[in-house]
Structure formats: C-alpha cells, structure tokens
C-alpha cells in the first residue's frame, strides 16, 4: 500500500465520526483524504457542540495532516489571468491553474489530457463537446472552467465502470449508433443524462400531459429526437441512435434499424 493510500485510510472512530456528522462527504474523504474544506466544515459542526460527543474520533482526525488535492502541472510557464479551480472529474479530485477565460472543454483536453470530449463547432451548436456536470448535461465549449469550482464533471472516459460498459454504450454498439465516431462521446454523455431526466419526470417541448407531472417518463421516438436535437451527427445515424436510447430507457428490445448487405 502506498503512502497516499495509507493517509486516506480512516480509523474505525474516524469513520464513525464522518458517518454520523458528515455522511455526504464520507466517500470523498476515503477517496482523496481529509482536506481543508472538510476541516472547515467539521469546525462549523464543532460550534454546535455536537463534536464533543465524538471526542476520540475528532482527536485522531485533527492530528492528521490535511490532504492535498492532486495538482496538474502546467506546461508553458505562467498563466495570464490565472485562477485556481478545484473540482472532481470522473470521480477524481483535480486542481488546475487556468486562464480565467478558458473553457471547460479546453481544460479537459489541454490540462487534464481527457481527449474524449471533442471540439466540433466551438460555438455550442453541434453537441460534440457535451459532458455531464452535477448530473446535468452541458456544452463544455460554452462553459467557463472557472465556474466549475466544487462541481462533479463526468466525461466520456467516466461513463463506463472499469471494463464494464454503460448500458447506453452497449446499446450504441448493438444498434450501430456511430459511424465516424467524432460526435459519439457527446451523444453518449447526452443520452446518459437524458435517462436521468426521464426518470425524474423532466418535461421537454413535446411532452404531453404536463399537468399530471409523472414521476418517470417512457420516452417515445419523438421525445428522444427532441431531447437529443442538440447533438448533431454528420454521418446521419439518427435512427440508430434513437433506437439505442429507446431500448435502454424502455427496457424493451428494439429491432435494429439497419441490415447487413449480402
């Protein structure tokens, strides 16, 4: 076990402390360590007198050194108009120094070497740069990285779980939902976020029965086309993309929209 992993291991008393007082931060603390932000939050809890009931765990914890967020090296020397941004990318905490005018897309590609998100039009019109920020899909070419302090970003590199593909990824393969592949990372990120929108009952322009406000929606082809209309495919694989999403969202087998020649 390396030194970093050892520093992130919590004792039983420390883990009990976080489970009871800061359960929403427990996973992050076990992953990246006890940071300055966690320390400040713990001190605010201490002001209520609650911390006294967990004396042993608190005493051990406050004796630990604060964990440093992984910092990304900056090529090319000093940054003009530089700002520090700390956020989570695909489950890992990152801290970067960037020009305050730098987009999230350029930060992902140039600073974090996550090249799966693509720059298509660079004007927010094609959707190739779509990523998921705090559960909502955004156009990373129109999002300033400086506004992403403290958020959780998921790119195409973080959609799969290890070597296990997300159901949307498997369905895109089954239905041949990509050809040249340039738009595919944005299409898949958009489709994954779309599934959560449907689960939450979020309406689109073509949703019927808005007064009923269902807790979950089963999406028709028209709904999927409307919700994916911001993602452009120059190869024209739209019927296959719609079928791939509909199969995962409905849980029903959808017939393939293409036939092999021969």
Image: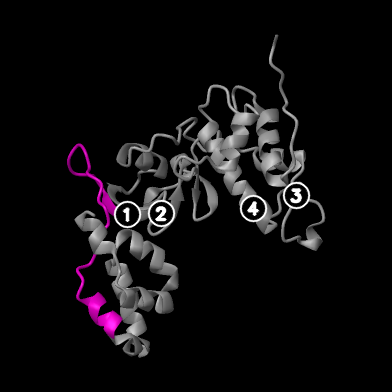
Q: Is residue 166 above or below residue 258?
A: below
Would you identify the image quadrant in which residue 237 lies? top right
Q: CA distance from mark 2 to mark 3?
A: 32 Å
Report helix, strand or loop for mark 3. Answer: loop
Residue 207 screen position, x and y as percent = 77, 50
Q: CA distance from mark 2 to mark 4?
A: 21 Å
Residue 231 screen position, x and y as percent = 59, 35
Which residue corresponds to the image point at 42% horizontal and 75% vertical from the top-left? 19
Residue 223 screen position, x and y as percent = 73, 43
Q: Residues within 10 Å of mark 3 (few under 14, many from 20)?
A: some
Residue 26 screen position, x and y as percent = 39, 68
Q: Which residue is mark 3?
A: 218
Q: Earlier in the sequence, mark 1 or mark 2?
A: 1
Q: Which residue is mark 2?
A: 148
Would you identify the image quadrant in which residue 105 lies? top left
Q: Which residue is mark 1?
A: 85
Q: Nearer the viewer, mark 2 or mark 3?
A: 3
Q: CA distance from mark 1 to mark 4?
A: 28 Å
Q: Which residues are magenta?
A: 56-84
Residue 68 in view here:
no
Magenta: main secondary structure equals loop
Q: Earlier in the sequence, mark 3 or mark 4?
A: 4
Q: CA distance from mark 3 to mark 4?
A: 11 Å
Which residue corresponds to the image point at 50% horizontal and 41% vertical from the top-left? 164
Q: Earlier in the sequence, mark 2 or mark 3?
A: 2
**Residue 91 as seen in the image, left or right of residue 13:** right
Which quadrant of the figure contains the C terminus? top right
Q: Nearer the viewer, mark 2 or mark 4?
A: 4
Report helix, strand or loop for mark 1. Answer: strand
């Amino acid at each position: 076990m390396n030194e970093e992993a050892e520093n992130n291991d919590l004792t039983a008393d420390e883990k009990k402390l976080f489970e009871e007082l800061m359960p929403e931060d427990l996973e992050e603390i076990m992953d990246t360590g006890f940071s300055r932000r966690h320390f400040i939050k713990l001190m605010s809890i201490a002001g209520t007198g609650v911390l006294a009931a967990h004396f042993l765990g608190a005493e051990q914890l406050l004796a630990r050194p604060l964990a440093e967020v992984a910092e990304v090296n900056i090529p090319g020397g000093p940054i003009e108009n530089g700002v520090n941004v700390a956020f989570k990318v695909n489950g890992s905490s990152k801290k970067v120094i960037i020009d305050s005018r730098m987009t999230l897309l350029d930060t992902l590609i140039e600073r974090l070497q996550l090249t799966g998100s693509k720059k298509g039009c660079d004007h927010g019109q094609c959707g190739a740069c779509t990523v998921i920020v705090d559960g909502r899909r955004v156009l990373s070419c129109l999002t300033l990285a400086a506004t992403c302090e403290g958020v959780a970003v998921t790119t195409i590199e973080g959609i799969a779980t290890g070597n296990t593909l997300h159901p949307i990824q498997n369905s895109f393969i089954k239905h041949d939902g990509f050809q040249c592949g340039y738009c595919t990372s944005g299409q898949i990120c958009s489709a994954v976020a779309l599934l959560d929108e449907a689960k939450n009952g979020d309406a689109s322009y073509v949703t019927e029965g808005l007064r009923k406000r269902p807790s979950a929606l089963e999406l028709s082809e028209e709904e999927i086309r409307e919700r994916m209309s911001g993602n452009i495919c120059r190869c024209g694989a739209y019927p296959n993309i719609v079928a791939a999403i509909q199969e995962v969202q409905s849980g029903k087998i959808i017939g393939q929209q293409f036939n092999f020649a021969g």
